[in-house]
Image: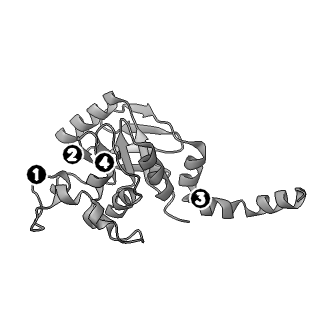
């Protein structure tokens, strides 16, 4: 498996109520030299997390121990800008397995799905409610059920359906990337090749 399978995630969440967060803010360009998906989490939101002397900025959400979890909640239009895969790598490497927003940039969404991060697009109303509830009660848990394609706020029971491509859904349920998927259907490919004339 390329990554852990994703079925049901129940976790507290980290709220980042900022709109139009682009990939350069997620992982600045100067940290893109590595080719392996390791160590990028250290520089997630680097310029927002740290001062020039590398001391943490106390007012940034990731430096606030009150908020934690495997779910990142971002503002509208999350992941815009350049198509760098490293933005998704940084989010995964930091420990997030799900990003919630009311709108994602398409390339960022696909980059997340390719490495095991579930991007969940919700209504503006639910996003606003999530921000409000988590600010008041940081220990609020959010349940994301991939099989049912639902997101539920534990304290209120409010639930909403989300869309996902069937192929990407199946891959995430199994922890497959595109190569794993092809390996899994190797016998079917061989049978098709045998029956198909050159």
- Looking at the rendering, which quadrant does residue 166 occupy? top right
Find the distance from the CA under tag 4 to the CA under tag 3: 26 Å
Sequence-first disc among 2 and 3? 2
In three-dimensional space, the C-alpha distance between marks 1 and 4, rounded to whole angstroms, equals 20 Å
- Disc on res. 22: 4
Tell me, for residue 178, which label it has, or none: 3
Q: How is the image coloured?
A: one colour
Tell me the tag on residue 59.
Answer: 1
Alpha-carbon span between mark 3 and mark 1: 39 Å
Q: Residue 165 location, x and y as percent?
A: 56, 42
Residue hosting label 2: 138
Residue 177 placed where, x, y %?
Answer: 56, 60
Residue at 9% across, 56% down = 58
Of circles 2 and 3, which is in front?
Answer: 3
**Contact check, label 4 and label 2, Cβ < 8 Å:** no
Which mark sits nearer the N-terminus, 4 or 3? 4
Task: Identify the residue shown where x is 30% and y is 48%.
Answer: 22
Quadrant location, the C terminus: bottom right
């Amino acid at each position: 498996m390329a990554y852990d399978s994703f079925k049901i995630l129940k976790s507290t969440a980290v709220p980042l109520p900022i709109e139009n967060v682009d990939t350069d803010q997620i992982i600045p360009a100067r940290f893109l030299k590595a080719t392996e998906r390791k160590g990028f989490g250290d520089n997630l939101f680097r310029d927002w997390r740290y001062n020039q002397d590398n001391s943490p900025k106390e007012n940034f959400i990731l430096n606030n121990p009150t908020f934690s979890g495997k779910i990142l909640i971002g503002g509208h239009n999350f992941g815009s800008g350049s198509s760098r895969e490293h933005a998704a790598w940084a989010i995964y490497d930091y420990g997030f397995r799900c990003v919630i927003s009311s709108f994602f940039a398409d390339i960022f969404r696909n980059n997340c799905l390719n490495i095991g991060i579930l991007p969940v697009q919700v209504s503006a109303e639910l996003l606003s409610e999530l921000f409000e509830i988590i600010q008041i009660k940081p220990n609020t848990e959010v349940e994301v059920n991939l099989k049912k394609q639902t997101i539920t706020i534990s304290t209120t029971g409010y639930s909403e359906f989300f869309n996902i491509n069937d192929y990407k859904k199946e891959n995430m349920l199994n922890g497959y990337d595109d190569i794993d998927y092809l390996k899994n259907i190797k016998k079917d490919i061989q049978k098709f090749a045998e029956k198909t004339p050159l």
